[in-house]
Image: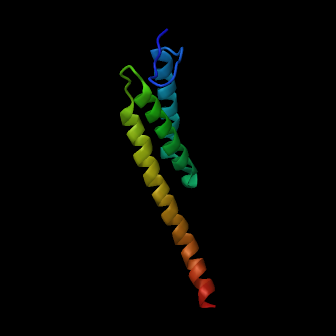
Amino acid sequence: MIAIYKEEFSEETREDVIRKVRMLLRIGIFFSIFWIAGIGSIISIMLGLKARGIIKRATVNLNGMGGVYWCLVVGALGLIISLLILIAIILPIFLKNIAK
């Protein structure tokens, strides 16, 4: 067994870390596509950041930054779209109540 992380002492093997990163990215990519009114986008961003942290702390070369970027960018776009939809729904109601 080798230590995979710079800061932490771990008994995880490289394969265990790769498996963990792949699982996080698969779930993150799923939620970035099915954003569920913005909640999936938030989950995607959180999982992308967690996978990015694991990759950055690794002492060995790990792949997966493409999946991290996907989770972050598509998750952020989904979150922005969700906020725009929310504003488009709430703003007319707010303006209608002010006009009364």
Residue 29 visible in the displayed image: no
Which residue is farthest bottom?
100
| 44 and 46: which is toward the camera | 46
For image coordinates 46% across by 58% down, the residue present is 80
**Image location of residue 12, percent across then percent down:** 52, 16
**Image location of residue 95, percent across then percent down:** 56, 83
**Image location of residue 92, percent across then percent down:** 55, 78
For image coordinates 51% across by 32% down, the residue present is 24
| 51 and 6: which is toward the camera | 6
Left or right: residue 73 compared with residue 82? left
Relative to 16, say whether 87 is above or below.
below
Left or right: residue 62 compared with residue 9? left
Relative to 90, say whether 6 is above or below.
above
| 55 and 94: which is toward the camera | 55
For image coordinates 37% across by 33% down, the residue present is 65
Which residue is farthest front?
7
